[in-house]
Each structure stands twice: as structure tokens, then as C-alpha cells.
Image (cartoon, helix red, strand yellow):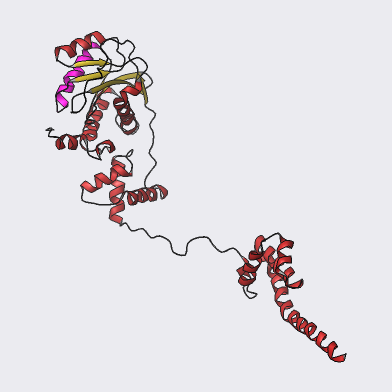
């Protein structure tokens, strides 16, 4: 009986020794708890409760509303000498990605983006490649993000110059025949107008002519859309489009429709008019108007007067036709595309 009593007393003595060892450490931990975060103090309380209640993981998990693996994880991580072991570890990666571009790359991307502030990374890659600098599209995108994040490159500011799409009112001429083929440059040029309001008391008229095949654009800016202006646009088409124009498509006629049709007939140019309320059938020139609005009128520094805007618009026309890459042309410029099909620019 005495032996049995000693055997029962032995584990009690062991637990007592464990408590003697553990109690000071846990007491120290509790004293330092105010320096810990709220989550770390809760984990400390959980481990303290776990020790004081028979080290039962399942019971501890139910008590504190956590999963059993969570209790095991914090038991394994807890270091009595380093209470910060109960804090959440940082989620940042141990190794951060280092930029692979050079300062020269960054400067080149910044320079070309400042020159063409409304162009994205895809077009900038093409321009950089022309200078001999071969960077991936993703790298150019990361460089642009870095420049914006550090404030070295300002956001693309949208100017308050008002641009309104003028809809011609009266249809007058034939519809485009279904059999009319559009395969070569000049087979069909879409013509449209924009109302440009650089100032509240100044309204200018832009004629936009786009060749559907090559994306070559001709832009004219004036004060009025008159019969004389219409004939003048046809003269500019002949001067600045490097191919003969076979047909022109307009959006639903206008007040100078008859004079314009006469001018087309005199030059041997077919004239097609779209059905009313069908701008989607004029998709090429509609897209051109949007592009010129966003990439020229919203960013130009030209004085808001006819003369300076005309000069700046002519420069932009050259950039658009000979420098700006077009995704629809496989990132060729209209000039490069024309050269590829044997048209001399």
C-alpha cells in the first residue's frame, strides 16, 4: 500500500516540478504582456490556459474558438525568452523583386511618354524599338508605374477643351452598294466633323477624313462648315493622301450636301451616305475622332485660337500618320503600312 502511494505521488511530484519551472516563465510573460499586441496577448492567455488545464489541445481549442492545428502551431512557435514569437509574422516576401531596368531605360521611357502623354505601353515599346532600345511591354509598364508612383511622371491631364460631334442632318445621295469592295487604300474614305470649342465663345469645325484600309488621316480645322470648306477638304485629300480616293462616305448628309456632292462628282469621287442614326456603320472615323480628341485636343499646349491650333493640328497629323503605331496595323504606322503594300508616301 505504501508503495502504491509512492507511485501515485511520483507523477504529482513531477507536475509540481514542472510548475516550478514553468510558473516563473509564464509570470514573466504576463508581466510583459502589455508590450504585446492584442492578438499576441490572446495567444499568451491561450497557452497559459492550456498549461494550467492539463495540456489538453482539444479542450483549449474549444475554449478559445480556434482549430486544433492553430493551438499546435502556437505551441511550437512560442519561445518564453522571446515573447515576440507570439506576434504575427510579416507577410512581405523574404526576397523582393529587384528592378532589371537601368537608369537609361527609365529616362528613355520617361522622355517618350512625356512627348506622347496619351500613349500606352504598347505603343511606347514600338517607339523605343525604333531607337534601338528593345524592352518588353511588361517592363515598360512597370517603369511607367514606377514613374507615376514616385511622382516623376504626372498623370495624364485631360484639358477642358470642349469637343462636340456634329451630326449631319439631311441624307442625300446613294447608300454604299453591298458589292462595293474595300480592299486597297483609297477604296473608301470616311468623312466626319467635330465641333471644337477651345473657348466658350469660339467654335471651330474640324473635318476628319480617314482611309478605312490604311488608317491614314487628314485633318482640317476652320471656322465654318460651308460649301467652300467642303470643296477645300476634297482638295486637301488630293494633296495629303498619298493615293487616289475612289469613294467617300459621310454621315447622313448636311446643309451643304448638294454642293459637296457636286464637288465629288467633278473630281470623279463616289459619294455614299449612311442611313440615319447609324453611327456604328462609320466606326473608322468615329474611332479617329475619339483618338484625336484624347491624344491631341485634351493634351495640346497650343493657344486656343484658330491659327495656333491649325499649326499644331498639322503637326499632330504628321505624328499620327508617320510615328504613332496602330494596333490594327500590327503596330505599324499608316506610312509603314502603305510602304508595305507598295504605296509611295
| 240 falls in the magenta region | yes
Closer to the camera in the image, 300 or 194: 194
Q: Position of residue 296 (x, y in %)?
A: 30, 32
| Image location of residue 323, percent across then percent down | 22, 38
Q: Position of residue 157 (x, y in %)?
A: 38, 36
Quarter of the image with the C terminus is top left
- The part of the image, by quadrant, that contains residue 66 is bottom right
Looking at the rendering, which quadrant does residue 221 occupy? Answer: top left
The relative height of residue 49 versus residue 139 in the rendered view (above or below) is below
Indicate whether 321 appears above or below 23. Answer: above
Please state which of residues 41 and 303 is positioned toward the viewer in this rendering.
41
Q: Which quarter shows the N terminus?
A: bottom right
Q: Is residue 64 shown left or right of residue 134?
A: right
- Is residue 261 visible in the rendered image? The answer is yes
Residue plotted at (66% across, 66% down): 71
Specify start and end residues of the magenta stretch as a single range. 225-243
The residue under the point 30% across, 48% down is 109
Of all residues, the one furthest to the right in this rendering is: 1
Vertical relation: 40 (above or below) 226: below
Specify the principal SS of the magenta part: helix
Q: Is residue 317 magenta?
A: no
Amino acid at each position: 500500500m505504501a508503495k502504491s502511494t509512492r507511485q501515485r505521488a511520483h507523477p504529482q511530484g513531477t507536475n509540481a516540478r514542472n510548475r516550478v519551472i514553468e510558473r516563473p516563465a509564464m509570470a514573466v510573460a504576463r508581466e510583459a504582456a502589455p508590450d504585446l499586441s492584442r492578438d499576441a496577448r490572446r495567444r499568451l492567455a491561450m497557452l497559459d490556459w492550456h498549461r494550467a488545464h492539463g495540456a489538453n489541445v482539444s479542450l483549449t481549442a474549444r475554449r478559445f474558438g480556434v482549430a486544433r492545428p492553430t493551438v499546435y502551431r502556437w505551441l511550437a512557435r512560442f519561445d518564453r525568452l522571446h515573447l515576440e514569437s507570439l506576434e504575427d509574422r510579416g507577410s512581405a516576401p523574404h526576397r523582393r523583386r529587384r528592378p532589371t531596368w537601368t537608369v537609361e531605360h527609365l529616362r528613355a521611357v520617361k522622355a517618350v511618354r512625356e512627348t506622347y502623354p496619351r500613349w500606352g505601353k504598347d505603343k511606347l515599346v514600338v517607339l523605343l524599338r525604333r531607337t534601338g532600345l528593345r524592352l518588353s511591354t511588361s517592363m515598360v509598364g512597370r517603369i511607367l508605374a514606377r514613374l507615376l508612383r514616385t511622382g516623376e511622371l504626372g498623370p495624364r491631364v485631360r484639358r477642358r477643351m470642349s469637343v462636340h460631334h456634329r451630326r449631319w442632318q439631311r441624307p442625300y445621295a446613294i447608300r454604299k452598294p453591298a458589292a462595293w469592295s474595300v480592299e486597297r487604300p483609297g477604296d473608301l474614305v470616311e468623312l466626319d466633323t467635330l465641333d471644337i470649342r477651345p473657348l466658350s465663345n469660339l467654335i471651330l469645325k474640324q473635318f476628319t477624313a480617314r482611309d478605312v484600309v490604311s488608317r491614314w488621316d487628314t485633318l482640317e480645322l476652320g471656322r465654318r462648315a460651308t460649301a467652300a470648306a467642303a470643296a477645300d477638304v476634297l482638295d486637301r485629300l488630293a494633296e495629303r493622301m498619298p493615293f487616289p480616293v475612289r469613294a467617300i462616305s459621310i454621315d447622313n448628309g448636311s446643309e451643304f450636301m448638294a454642293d459637296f456632292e457636286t464637288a465629288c462628282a467633278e473630281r470623279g469621287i463616289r459619294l455614299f451616305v449612311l442611313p440615319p442614326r447609324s453611327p456604328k456603320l462609320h466606326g473608322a472615323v468615329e474611332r479617329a475622332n475619339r483618338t484625336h480628341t484624347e491624344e491631341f485636343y485634351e493634351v495640346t499646349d497650343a493657344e486656343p485660337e484658330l491659327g495656333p491650333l491649325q499649326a499644331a493640328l498639322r503637326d499632330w497629323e504628321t505624328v499620327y500618320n508617320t510615328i504613332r503605331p496602330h494596333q490594327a496595323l500590327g503596330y505599324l504606322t499608316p506610312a509603314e503600312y502603305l510602304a508595305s503594300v507598295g504605296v509611295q508616301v
